[in-house]
Image (cartoon, coloured by chain):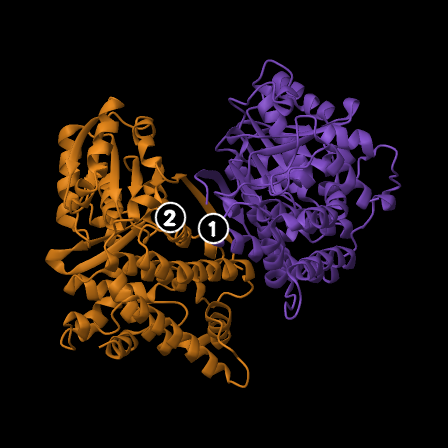
Chain colours: A orange, B purple
Amino acid sequence: MNSFQFVNPTHIVFGEGTASQVGQLASKYGKTILLVYGSGSIKKTGLYDKTVGLLHEAGIKVHELPNIEPNPRLSTVNKGIDICRTEGVDFILAVGGGSVIDAAKAIAAGVLYEGDVWDFFTGKAVIGKALPLGTILTLAATGSEMNGNSVITNWEENLKRAFGSPYTYPKFSILDPTLTYTVPRNHTVNGAVDIMSHVFEQYFSLTENTPLQERFCESILQTVIENVEIALEQPEDAAARANLMWCGTMALNGGLISVGMTNDWASHGIEHEVSAIYDIPHGAGLAVIFPNWMKYVHEERIDRFVQFATRVWGVNAEGKTDNEIALEGIQATRDFFTRIGAESRLADFGIGSDKLDRMAEEAVRYGAIGSFKRLEQQDVKAILELSL
Amino acid sequence: MNSFQFVNPTHIVFGEGTASQVGQLASKYGKTILLVYGSGSIKKTGLYDKTVGLLHEAGIKVHELPNIEPNPRLSTVNKGIDICRTEGVDFILAVGGGSVIDAAKAIAAGVLYEGDVWDFFTGKAVIGKALPLGTILTLAATGSEMNGNSVITNWEENLKRAFGSPYTYPKFSILDPTLTYTVPRNHTVNGAVDIMSHVFEQYFSLTENTPLQERFCESILQTVIENVEIALEQPEDAAARANLMWCGTMALNGGLISVGMTNDWASHGIEHEVSAIYDIPHGAGLAVIFPNWMKYVHEERIDRFVQFATRVWGVNAEGKTDNEIALEGIQATRDFFTRIGAESRLADFGIGSDKLDRMAEEAVRYGAIGSFKRLEQQDVKAILELSL
């Protein structure tokens, strides 16, 4: 285990009906709010009307930024920054999934920065302050509700970049699993893949002596695997939805499950290059990339892949070589993604080989990526080729 | 899963050598510090001199409250409150194990309260503010370094009581596993029992549909079981000490591992009555009480005990009844405690049957205790009798 620091100040309010607390919670932080949301599904479900009503009741003035994209765009973030400055917004409320929350974080940091908010994503500047923000989560997936991370796409330049900051943790996040009952089937699938992928990025690590962290990772994986098919068959299964939601939050809540471990994040880096060009859903891209990353790197630390196969997938190790056990665990992962309805090839999105070189080049623009196995440009290209 | 709220603001600084950061961390919060510590082992190890030196270097004035008892006493807490008021202390630094931290929390809350600090333990008053406090942990056990709980003994009245408050979470806790290398053998044992007992109080719950929480609990139990014997055989095993320390913190960090679950805490209540009269170490008392509590209550929810036996202890379930499997798991717990050197009977501490009635009566003074099985006075007495 490496040395580490950990702190996570986000206040979680979890359970059916908790969205009714939004006025009371938000009024602790602001009087003039920017309400950030997506394509309008919250209008169909009534969550929009309810939220705005509760905010008004709490004496809060509400401005709006609708239509946040699934891969939220820099141009949209800049629109939000303008509104905040013009209207004197002092608190941002994100109502939606990870994309909406990520956009809200970027706006929160950008409002108080004189330069271009994109500087935070390129590393040209570091966030030193941000407007406070809160969230009402409507999708179990990214964990953005309990961390300081944001991923934004600069569509003009086909760049998808991330920041992580202690200043952009939500002050509160309302997690009402019943709000996920109406989530489209493919979003539930992609969310589950995203959760599992976040765990993979932390679990497949070269750091020694981290038994508790490894078990926490396995706990989340097992619980997602048990619950996602229930949620797909019975979208209003309260227990399955609650379990998935809490798994999503725990999988990436400031790194609690992997404290003291070197993380990898190469697969996310590769997927970001794919979706920066082709605008496919993040979880869908990960479902394609991750099993191929596993195949490409598993020999770096075969014991971790053997542990993964036996503990998470229940692979019977008897009479098999480590490599056989590991490959069986990887195949089980692939089969599971396929069984729940995730795509397995880039071709399923109409993506061919023509831009692989550009993606591979861009992925390593700051040098090799990943830590489980350091990936150079040719390694990234090889994983992309496996994924075609 | 029940609805819940969760927030834990404590900043954890974990790793070898991290105690050297104390001056920098403490100076964020105070200029005049009360340094709270125990019997003086920190003087033998040099931690005292090092800490005081670093605080002075940071321009901090240091007052002291030494000699915190293993079951910290109200009279000692009141001494600390007096010093804080007389000297204008604005930050409290606890250097030690759970007892020292618990005393620091009671002092922190008591200083800003006009009445008797004991009111917080009897429920006569609720904490509304407290001085900020920080900790340097020297024992893996109570989790007090990352929660708002405090347990104090009123020796004059033979009462041991607890409070939990959002205002008494440490601002920071420095967790340097190497500081536990010199912990006496029996403290390592009692600490491990304490950690496991904290998990038991949360894990044996009637709440349905909490698979992730249950697995987190099992993860801690398995990791403690794997590591404590290594630490006993090789007190300077860095990995074992680090794993035990992090298990202790995770086991009781504001309830993260059991969010949305009803907890029990009856065994702690019973043990508190024993140690309030006989002043035995908390962990030692728990090692006696807990397996007997398990025997007494396991039929309330046999499936949880079957899960415990099979997942944590690897009990082979084949051809056995649920009751046989459950009892095998309970016996494995008892055997493990004995194997690492914990006492199994109250008689081992010279405790006879003469005060069982008083302890049982006092345990249920506010009504039946526990939630896995509600325990009336006669139930508590029965568990104590099993423990003689």
Q: Position of residue A31 (x, y in %)?
A: 25, 25
- Determine the secondary structure under disc 2: helix
- Asked if residue A299 shows in the view, the reply is no
The amino acid on which the numbered mark 1 sits, given as a three-letter code, is: Asn
Q: Nearer the viewer, residue A220 or A131?
A: A220
Q: Position of residue A55 (x, y in %)?
A: 25, 28
Question: Tag 2, which chain?
Answer: A
Q: Quadrant of residue B314?
A: bottom right
Could you tell me which residue is drawn at 53 percent across and 53 percent down?
Answer: B214
The amino acid on which the numbered mark 2 sits, given as a three-letter code, is: Ala
Q: Is residue A330 above or below residue A244?
A: below
Q: Is residue B367 above or below residue A284?
A: above
Horizontal arrangement in the rendering, residue B87 relative to residue A293 (left or right): right
Could you tell me which residue is drawn at 31 percent across and 66 percent down?
Answer: A340
- Asked if residue A20 shows in the view, the reply is yes
Q: Nearer the viewer, residue B287 or B86?
A: B287
Could you tell me which residue is drawn at 52 percent across and 48 percent down?
Answer: B257
Question: Tag 1, which chain?
Answer: B
Question: Which residue lies under the disc numbered 1?
Answer: B209
Q: Nearer the viewer, residue B177 or B373?
A: B373
Question: Which residue lies under the disc numbered 2?
Answer: A238
Instruction: State if disc 1 and disc 2 touch (CB < 8 Å).
Output: yes
Q: Position of residue A122 (x, y in %)?
A: 24, 54
